[in-house]
Image (cartoon, rainbow, N blue to C red):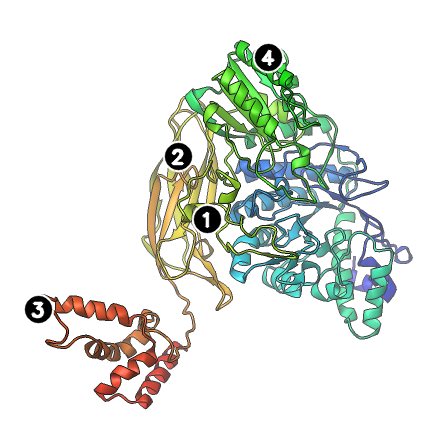
Amino acid sequence: MNIKELVSQMTLEEKAGLCSGDDFWHTKAVERLGIPRTMVSDGPHGLRKQDQKADHLGVNDSIKAVCFPAASATAASFDPDMIREMGEALGDSCQHEELCVLLGPAVNIKRSPLCGRNFEYFSEDPYLAGKMATAMIQGVQSRNVGTSIKHFAANNQEHRRMSSSSDADERTLREIYFPAFEMAVKEAQPWTVMCSYNRINGVYASENPWLLTEVLRKEWGFKGYVMSDWGAVSDRAAGVAAGLDLEMPASGGINDALIVKAVREGKLDEKAVDLACERILTIVYRYLENAKPETPWDLEAQHEQAAEIAAECMVLLKNEDGILPLKKEEPVAFIGEFARVPRFQGGGSSHINCVRVTGALEAAEGLPVTYARGYSVAEDAATEEMIAEAVAAAKKAKTAVVFAGLPDSYESEGYDRTHMRMPECQNRLIEAVAEANPNTVVVLHNGSPVEMPWIGKVKAVLEAYLGGQAVGRAEIRVLYGEVNPCGHLPETFPLKLEDNPSFLFYGGEGNVTEYREGVFVGYRYYDKKKMDVLFPFGHGLSYTTFAYSDLKLSAESMKDTDSLTVTAKVTNTGSVRGKAVAQLYAGAAGGDVIRPVRELKGFAKVMLEPGESREVRFTLDKRSFAYWNQKIHDWHVETGAYTIEIGASSRDLPLKGTVQIESTVRIPQTWTLDSIFMDIMKDPAAREAVLPMLEQTVKTFGPGEGENREPDDDPAVTEDMSMAMLNYMPLRGAFSFQQEAGASREELLALLEKLNAGTR
């Protein structure tokens, strides 16, 4: 198909029309030229295909489909291969249902536990989010169905999401909020990118040329088309000029007419409209030429796959006295409405009309399990009768398992949480059950961290997150040891909401939200401040134990243009087969730039038999050690020492090594009379030029023989003190002291010229 030729045959009105949807879910057809329309569908963890009475937030029913675990859960797997297989299943579903693009994955960073849509996002860490997103995109698109990675960019709250401006410096955007998108674009080339609702530093994402053209296309090499989030367009003509190709949903022709008007008035180059059409049609025909509606969609097989994935994602947070796994012959009480009717997905545009749902109570059929409701989700309450029934059941059982978490109303697209607490009725229930039976286990269903005031009173906590429609089957497999838990937290669980680095500024004032915490998001902040947390990033227990040893670095020193190979050994030191997640963190040991102590730069999930050891291998390049330097607008590695740490979480890192890295990039400097000696002396060329003046200044500045000097003063110490004070003196300040030595202002200016000539 010659796309350019096809576009050249279209009228301006037809081209403008192609740049918006035909309705809620379809691109426009151009019947005169035989161009058909194609359909997109919400995801990202299942299909929410709607043909009739379409809506964006899930008010109306969609087709029956399989709900896989949400991103909050799948990220905990630390298993890109498994997520790629999930993507393949979703791609098959899309082909069967004749869908061109699946709207997802969502890779926005979890800046705060309060974001109502956190369940749909992967992590507080951009590296982990990028790896998981890349795998999912590769899986879906291997079936010749497109994805739409979203929401680009800095969409980290639901509060005022359609009007608020996310105000952050470029370093913060580049290091925290862009990398997941960047990695996915460079490594997986999603067919489409969905821009976010919000403004970024005052400019709507939908009409931001720096975002959509300079960064996304020119820097990262994105080849597909950019679509708007539903209703995210403010100025349509400005959007086309900036790089927004497709407006969704339909505007009833209103915005199409604005495009035509802007072109005819000379305010918009028609070539920009042509380019948008070419991008859209390239994707339309890429799908149509590879469409396979005969692709089978085995709902039952995908239900089982959803159960397997959910089990791999569950995080064992606590397991005192090895209370888990449960023994199948011992009496157990299942307490809590979520045991019967689990919460397994979030609210809003990702809500799936499930073909079936399996709760833990149903999955435990045949086991010696009794059930007590414990609380009412609909009423958000627990009556005295409910709690009494739960306590009675707990007393009769060997172990009491409380299924708890956040109701649908607590977290959803469209609004944020106002606190990090679970329902008070559930907290009271857990306290009462734990008092009645010391062998109490809590299973959590939530899309984001919660406070746990009862954590010291229960023996075990299993984080199920929002585990999809087969979550109950997965919970039974993990609770009873059929599956050894191997999930690790993709986010930090703080002790309380107030500990979160964005707490003071999250939500913002009016339509402005300032990202004042900068790059210190999640564990980057908690580790820098050495703060106690409830559970650290990367944490996850197992029914076996692992040991880390034999850290080896391929070099003790290197240039920033080299790569570093890191290897270590992981050993299963327990008696049960299990999977370890080896996590590698890198960090600058010093330097002038304020940076996190450590940042995740690699991970590997390995299955080990009891006593078995395996080597894990990582390759680190310049980007692994770099920060975004706003002066040169590029990634930069300072010369200095860098730490390499490997272990089971950001707070459990038994292996540590150091590599010395030499920067090959000279940061341009412009010295002035206001530059201080401390900074000048750090530059080798400048240091050589200014050292004679500095030495003379020290002699002049310091006390002479017998002047203000005690008899026992050490001359070397006195000189050091003088030097320390002079560190902060501007070059112009030295002039006053140099006059006594015969220096002129002309000589000082000549020195300044020499300094700047040496840094060019």
Give the residue type that dot 1 points to: Tyr
N-terminal label among 4 and 2: 4
Q: Nearer the viewer, residue 290 or 165?
A: 165
Q: Nearer the viewer, mark 1 or mark 3?
A: 3
N-terminal label among 1 and 3: 1
Give the residue type that dot 3 points to: Pro
Occupied quadrant, residue 272: bottom right
User: Which label sits on residue 369?
Assistant: 4
Q: Nearer the viewer, mark 4 or mark 3?
A: 3
Residue 462 appears left or right of 671:
right
Say if residue 10 shows up in the picture: no
The residues tagged by marks 4 and 1 sit, at their Cα atoms, a distance apart of 43 Å
Q: Label 1: few (<14), some or many (≥20) within 10 Å? A: many
Q: Identify the residue position indicated by label 3 in the image.
A: 711
Q: Identify the residue position indicated by label 2 in the image.
A: 570
Q: Secondary structure at mark 1?
A: helix
The residues tagged by marks 1 and 3 sit, at their Cα atoms, a distance apart of 49 Å
Say if residue 556 shows up in the picture: yes
Q: Label 3: few (<14), some or many (≥20) within 10 Å? A: few
Q: Are marks 4 and 2 in contact (CB under 8 Å)?
A: no
User: Which label sits on residue 525?
Assistant: 1
Q: Secondary structure at mark 3?
A: loop
Please tell me whether residue 675 is drawn above or below residue 428 in the rendered image.
Answer: below
N-terminal label among 4 and 1: 4
Q: Residue at x 70, y 59 (%)?
A: 206
Q: Label 4: few (<14), some or many (≥20) within 10 Å? A: some
Q: In the rendering, at what x and y percent does residue 7 appear?
A: 81, 63
N-terminal label among 1 and 2: 1
Please tell me whether residue 728 is drawn above or below residue 573 in the rendered image.
Answer: below
Q: Residue at x 75, y 48 (%)?
A: 287
